[in-house]
Image (cartoon, coloured by chain):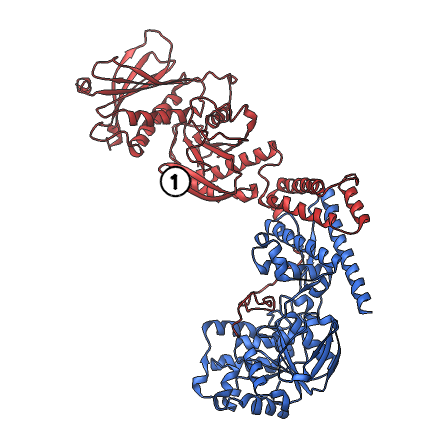
Chain colours: A blue, B red
Amino acid sequence: MEGKRSSSQRGDLLRKIREVTRSILEDLSNGRSPSVSIDRFRNYCTNPNANCYCSSDFSKGKEILTLQRECHAHRLNVMLRVLLIVQQLLQENIHGSKRDIYYMHPTVFSEQSVVDRAINDLCILLQCSRHNLNVVSVGNGLVMGWLRFLEGGRKFDCINSLNTAHPVPVHVEEVKDIISVAQYILVVEKESVFQRLANDQFCNTNRCIVITGRGYPDVPTRRFLRLLVEKLRLPAYCLVDCDPYGFDILATYRFGSMLMAYDAKFLRVPEIRWLGAFPSDSENYGLPNQCLLPLTADDLRRTEAMLHRCYLQREEPHWRLELELMLQRGVKFEIEALSVNSISFLSKEYIPSKIQGGVHM
Amino acid sequence: MIFADYQLFSNALLLLFLPSFEFPFRIRVWEAVWRSLRTLKYTGEGISAEKWDGVVFVTTTGICDNEIYHYQLNLQENISTRRLTKLPSNPKNGAKFSGTEVALSTFDCIDDLLAEITLFLQKTLILKIPKVAIELAFEHGVLPGSQCENVIVANECDPLPFVTSNIENLKSGLEDYVLKHGNRLDKKCHSCFPSREHLKVGSGIAFCKESHRSTGHVMETVIIISELSEPSSTCFRTFGAKTEVLYFNDFSPCLISQSSLNALTSIDWKSYGLTLKSAIDQDGHALLEWEHLPPNAHIDIVLHSYHKQYPLFLLARQKTQFDRNLVKKAVKQALDDLKEKHAGILLSAHAHYAPDLARTIAGLIMSSNDSDFQGECFSLLGLQSQEIGGEIVGECIKEKIITVIEMNDRKPQRSREAAPFLFEDDCFQEPDFQDEEYEEGEEAYRFL
């Protein structure tokens, strides 16, 4: 069934690609500049009144690329080159990474972000997700704990070695037969914290699945987390540094990112709860002053900008209050700072007590 | 007494302008002499203050004059009223002729000065001022007439129609200049330019209407784009691929003003497919350096600023402003004229994408595994589906893209710039966090 579905999806996408090509040719043959209409999406705005439509997943406008402006001509050139590569990937049913695509025309693309933007534009144009284009990631996320599943026939048995890191599967759409006896999913921002928990044999004493995106989570990590939450119906808790980056990573799991707002509905995890570290944790856990670092000018600027995001006020006002508190105090700290008195404090006390006590938001 | 002094000089130069123009033009010639010599004095290395006292003698007569007038002009005199001394005139005895002779004498070695004046006069010839002959001669030694040599004798005998406009003359003059590789050769280079068809010529005229504020200020410009198929190694231009902007003010070669140079840099060259890298004043030569110009292509630009009314009294500030506006207008007009006359040139910068775009679209068609779709595309392009290769399809698409860009270029600027946004993007910029876009290890993570 899976094979048939993906084959018909590919056929559908190839038909759409031909339509795009045909429409460009028709315009040119009629002496008109080709025009390619790209819907624009955003998952938040900075409207203080919150009378916006950001919570809907509809497009928030259109951009029409034509040959009338140089920047558009360049974007069309890049986009069509990527489209040609995608057509080949789909026709031959093979996969390529964004980096592979970049290296096919490095001088034209000039930098990876140019390819990334073109891929996003194509997803919007063809109304699909990136993996549907057969464009995949190398995969950056790690997982361990009470979990077993198959990915394209390959068995991932994390239960067999509870505290060993496994890579997050790249072809999330091919993941099936998920078996778990976990009680919750713990998402940690950093690999160092993930390794701390592995060293402390955290999963031996806690029935959970631990995932890290190693910084900003990539698409497979977020899709995999979402799949687990949906299939296993488990609560998910997120542990990030108490600084603007940590908060933004938390928001990326929760709301999706602006760059991929068009696909946010498939990538965000609205159920995720913020476990820490809260600005208030520094007092509650008696962090010494030397563990608290002053917010830099850049941190202040980023924090102030995040406070304006409409979704915080509308959907997570408590998160916003904590963020305000961080700004007021003017200090930040890393999760590791909690280990100041005991190296296993995080796995033995902090996380279990927070989960059992319901100290999350 | 004066003449007695000059007997001591070892070298003498004579510049002869022989116009049959009416009075105002004679003043212009005079003005031109004054300005030209000042230009030479300040920029040239040929005349040193020790070897020349700054005095020139001017002899002039109009066609209707009964006398030949003699003047002494002292270029080193700071008080303007004392600069010109009228000397006794001669009767013409009923003869009908006109002309102006300028003479100066110097102790110095004449070679450098001569080269510079020759260059100057050759530039002047670009104007092809009708019915003006120019002769440059010099005498070496104390005795008048001894070792006399004519360096330049120019009598424009080209079969231009008798009554031609200044701009037509300027076009013809610049063409000759280009054909001689920017006056580096004495004659036209037939190996590079077998015919004038190799030159793409455009011209523009901008003027201020006569009013209480202006006096019929005219700016004429000619732009020539030449492309050599196989340039010989000996045929090169003094400034290479750079464009020396030739500037004339009231029929005389002149240093370009800063305001005119600024005007040139402010032109939207990109909309004509040109990328201006720099505009500099290099030792009195205004040079425009281009990026991505085809290797054998060259652009020549001449600007001529003059006034229909004469003499003219303009405030310096006014003149600067006029110059700036008129240069822009005239150059744009000349570029538009070039585009109008020569299809496929000076297309806006994004036409550079046409070959790439065409190749990619052809690739989308040719690599498709749907033969019905391919057939449809061929018929849209007006191609027969038998034995069509990707190259033919690409060429056909490229032509269509260029046609579309060309048509769009012809539209007024305003309608061209109407950005096709269907909504007002209240896009705000947050400080850029890293995002999941950098997911494949190509960026170092701060958190690792």
Query: For this rendering, which residue is in front, A24 or B120?
Result: A24
Q: Which quadrant of the figure has residue A61?
A: bottom right
Q: x, y (%) of residue A208?
A: 66, 86
Asked whether residue B375 appears in the rendered view, the answer is: yes
Q: Residue at x 23, y 26 (%)?
A: B108
Q: Which quadrant of the figure has residue B352?
A: top right
Query: For this rendering, which residue is in front, A111 or B275?
Result: A111
Left/right of residue B22 with respect to residue B48 in the rendered view:
right
Q: Residue at x 26, y 29 (%)?
A: B47
The three-letter amino acid code for the residue at tag 1 is Asp
Asked whether residue B419 appears in the rendered view, the answer is: no
Q: Which quadrant of the figure has residue A219?
A: bottom right
Q: Is residue A251 above or below residue B318?
A: below
Q: x, y (%) of residue B249?
A: 40, 31
Left/right of residue A228 with respect to residue B347 in the rendered view:
right
Q: Residues within 10 Å of mark 1 (few under 14, many from 20)?
A: some
Left/right of residue B141 with respect to residue B382 in the rendered view:
left
> How many marks are shown on the rendered structure?
1
Left/right of residue A25 with respect to residue B288 in the rendered view:
right
Quarter of the figure that contains the C terminus of chain A: bottom right
Q: x, y (%) of residue B146?
A: 25, 13
Chain ID of residue with mark 1: B
Q: x, y (%) of residue A1?
A: 83, 69
Q: Is residue B388 above or below residue B190?
A: below
What kind of element bears circle 1?
Answer: strand
- According to the image, label 1 marks what residue? B281
